[in-house]
Structure formats: structure tokens, C-alpha cells
Image: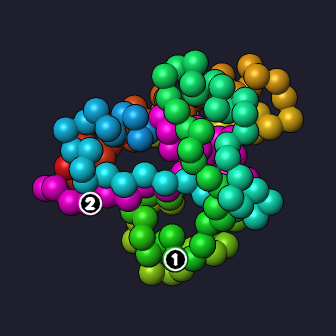
Amino acid sequence: MSTSINVLFVCLGNICRSPTAQGIFQSMVDSHPSAHSIYVDSAGTGDWHIGAPPDSRAVSAAKQRGCDISGLRARQVTRQDFDQFDYILAMDAQNLLDLRAICPGNFKGTLCRFLDFADMQADVPDPYFGGSEGFEHVFDLCQSASRGLLAHISRHHV
């Protein structure tokens, strides 16, 4: 059963974790047979960085692994995202709570933490106030969860 699936990754400012997840998942989708039917985006619950590129440390960590996220720009999540996206995936419990607070009652998609798709009941830690090793760790976590998410979508949608 082939259908269009829309995936949104959400963190606080949309400059570290969610653009990293978007870039990793997009690169996996691009090499998948159903690439044409999966749309990927990211957003933040906060508005501090709207229009800004990803943090340079996130760009560097991704580039070292062959993933270019430098062209992405931060945006804030909106209620309309719940109409467009089938999967809205929060990087941590607080962002999940913030998303649930604006989620309309008729949302029929999946709203959960991203690491649920890596069989981890955990948050993707925010690396913003740390060093580059935190961004490497975020990349590893997002890569693992992206594999699980793509396998889930392949089993259930395409």
C-alpha cells in the first residue's frame, strides 16, 4: 500500500537535533525505493532561531559523516503541521509535552519521542551548551532512530 508519508522532527530551537535528524533521515530516504513518497522536514517549539541555519557544530558533525544539513533553515512548529504530517517526532519529553499542548484533538498521526523508533525510552540530549562530542552523540542516536523509523514506515505504509 503506497501512500505519501510526511515526517516532522521537532526540537527546541531547530538548529541542533531536529535538523540533524532531518538530514540523516532524508539521506536514508533518498536511497530508499520509496523515496518519492516520503517527505521530511524539521521545526522547533521555540521561535529564537527562525530563519537561522543549523548550529555550526551540528553542520560539522553531519558533514564528517557525509550528510549536508547546511542549507536547512529553522522554523517554528505550527498547529497546521498537525494537518500535514503523519509523524511528528519530538527529540525529548519536554518538546513532546509542548507539542501535545498545541495538538488538535483530531490529529490522527503519530506523536512520540524520536528515540522510540530505536527502542529507547530516552531523550535525544540537547548538545547546544556542550562541546562537539555532544553533536557526535546526537548524530549516532538520530542515525539509529532513523533506521528504525524507515523500517517502520516501510512495513506499515509503503
On screen, residue 45 versus residue 39, left or right, reads right
Counting residues from the start of the chain, the first of labels 1 and 2 encountered is: 2
Kindly state the secondary structure of the residue where label 1 is placed.
Answer: loop
Q: Was residue 19 drawn as part of the magenta stretch in this picture?
A: yes
Which residue occupies the extreme right position in the image? 129
Reading the image, the residue beneath label 2 is 4
Residue 134, quarter of the rendered image? top right
Which residue occupies the extreme bottom position in the image? 105
Is residue 39 shown above or below 68? Answer: below
Q: Identify which residue is drawn at 74% across, 19% down.
A: 133
At label 2, counting other C-alpha atoms closer than 10 Å, the crowd grade (few under 14, some 14-19, many 20 or more) is: some
Magenta segment: 1-24
Residue 57, quarter of the rendered image? top right
Q: Would you say residue 56 is visible in this rendering?
A: yes
Q: Identify which residue is drawn at 58% across, 27% down.
A: 62
Residue 139, quarter of the rendered image? top right
Is residue 135 shown above or below 110? Answer: above
Which residue occupies the extreme front position in the image? 71
Residue 67: horizontal and vertical position, in percent?
Answer: 50, 29
Q: Amino acid at mark 2?
A: Ser
Q: Was residue 134 drawn as part of the magenta stretch in this picture?
A: no
Tell me the distance, in whole angstroms, between the alpha carbons under discs 1 and 2. Answer: 17 Å
Reading the image, the residue beneath label 1 is 80
Q: Amino acid at mark 1?
A: Gln
Residue 111: horizontal and vertical position, in percent?
Answer: 51, 60
Colouring convention used in this rendered image of the protein: rainbow
Residue 113: horizontal and vertical position, in percent?
Answer: 57, 48
Kindly state the secondary structure of the residue where label 2 is placed.
Answer: loop
Q: Would you say residue 115 is visible in this rendering?
A: no
